Image: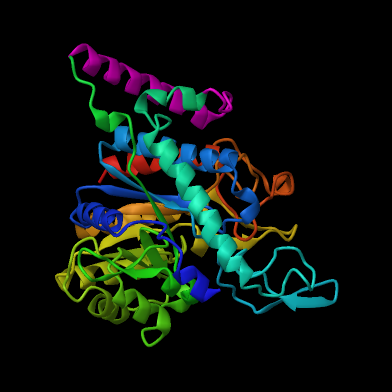
Amino acid sequence: MIAELESYPPLVFAGECDQLRARMAAVARGEAFVLQGGDCAESFDAVSAEHIRAKLKTLLQMGAVLTYAASVPVVKVGRIAGQYSKPRSKPTETRDGVTLPTYRGDSVNGFDFTEAARIPDPERLKRMYHASASTLNLVRAFTTGGYADLRQVHAWNQDFVKSSPSGQRYEQLAREIDNALNFMRACGTDPAEFQTVEFFSSHEALLLDYESALTRVDSRTGQLYDVSGHMVWIGERTRQLDHAHIEFASRIRNPIGIKLGPSTTAEEALQYIERLDPEREPGRLTFIVRMGADKIRDRLPELVEKVTASGATVAWITDPMHGNTYEAASGHKTRRFDDVLDEVKGFFEVHKSLGTHPGGIHVELTGDDVTECVGGGDEIFVDDLHQRYETACDPRLNRSQSLDLAFLVAEMYRDQ
C-alpha cells in the first residue's frame, strides 16, 4: 500500500506550502492571526458536499468576524483533508465485558465496536488519500468559485438559526460588512481579494507510513515537502525529541506545528526550535499550546519568555479544547464552553503581560448543530448531550458556539 501511495500525485503543492509559511511568518511577527479549525477526527462517511460546505462556511464566518471585528488579517487553516488518524491514551476499549482494540481513526480501523471493524486495514490508507483528494477538490472549488465571496456573507446566514444570539450578532456584522462593501463599490473599487479566500489544509502527521509515502522532492529546489497537507503538526503524545515524528518533521520544508501540553519545559521548547527551526526562520515553527484552563496562566509564561529571549520568532496558537475534556455522568466525553473560553482568555492575558503576540486559535468544530460541548450563548446542557452526539472521538463546538467564540476572541484581540 505504501508503494502504491508513493506513485500517487501530490494532494497539495510545494509552492502553496511556501505561501502558508509566508503567512505564518506574518503571524509570528505579530501582523496576522491564525484561525485553525475542523473535525477532531474526519470520517470517510462525512466526505459529502454538505458536510464540507458546512464546515467551511463556519470557518469562513468565524474568519469574517475576526477580520472585521478585530481589524486583523486572518490566516485560515482547516483541520481538514487528512485528519483521519487519532492517537489514543489506551490500546484497548472494554464494553459490557468485551475488550477490543481502540478505534484509531478511519485511516486505521473502523468505529463500530466489532472485532472485524477494529482490525487495522492498510486499504484504509488509500481511502484516506482519496477522501482527502475529494475534500481538497471541493474546498478549492468553494474558496475560488464565488462561494466564498465576501458579498455572500448574508447568504451564509439565511439558513442559520435566527433565534440564536450568535446568529443575530452575525447578522448585524454582516450588514456592516455589506455597507462597507457598498461604500467601496460606490467609490469605484471592487478588489478581487473579496471574491476568493486563501484556505490551507492541515492535520496531525501521526501515521508516518502515510506521510513519508507522500513526501516528495520539489523540482524547483530539490527539497523535501510532505504533500499530504500544507501544514502538519506533531501531537502531544508523539513529540519526544529522540522519536521518529520529530525526526520526520525536521526533514521537510512545510510549516510545522507542535502541540505543547502542561508538562512541556522551556528547555524542551528551545530544543524543538534547535531541531525543527535551526535557521530561525519566521513561519517555519508554530507552538500550539494546550494546557487546560486551570494551568495556562501558570505554565505558559516561562515558555513564552524563554523562547522570546532566545531570539526565535515562532507563532503562538492556543488550542483550548484538548486540555479541557471531561466525562459527563452520562458517559459522554464533553467540554464546557466556559472552560474553552477561559483558556483562551488566559492565553491572551499571558501574551499581554509579556508584550508578545497571541498568534491564533486552534479549535475542534463542525458546521452541524451537534450537542457535544456544554454551554455557549445558545446553551447546551449536560442532559442535551445525547440528542446529537455525533463525533467519532472528541467533542466539537457546533456552529453557534464557534461563532460565539469568534466574537469573544475578536474582543480579546482588540483589547490587547
Numbered marks: total: 0
Q: Position of residue 15 (x, y in %)?
A: 26, 56
Quadrant location of residue 249?
bottom left
Q: Which residues are magenta?
A: 158-187
Extreme residue toward the top, this view: 186
Return the residue nearer the eye: 118 or 184: 118
Q: In this rendering, does residue 341 appear at all?
A: no
Indicate left or right for 137 with 74 as reference. Answer: right
What secondary structure do most residues of the magenta stretch adopt? helix
Return the residue nearer the eye: 233 or 136: 136
**Magenta-colored stretch includes residue 181:** yes
Indicate left or right for 344 with 49 as reference. Answer: left
> Above or below — where is 90 with respect to 334?
below
Q: Position of residue 364 (x, y in %)?
A: 51, 53
Quadrant location of residue 117?
bottom right
> Above or below — where is 354 with respect to 387?
below
Indicate left or right for 201 with 225 as reference. Answer: right
> Above or below — where is 143 with respect to 241?
above
Quadrant location of residue 145?
top left
Q: In this rendering, does residue 106 appear at all?
A: yes
Q: Residue at x 30, y 72 (%)?
A: 252
Extreme residue toward the right, this view: 96
Return the residue nearer the eye: 195 or 321: 195
Q: Which quadrant, please, contains the N terminus?
A: bottom right
**Magenta-colored stretch includes residue 411:** no
> Above or below — where is 55 with respect to 158?
below
Q: Residue at x 32, y 43 (%)?
A: 198
Q: Position of residue 124 (x, y in %)?
A: 61, 66
Q: Position of residue 2 (x, y in %)?
A: 51, 75
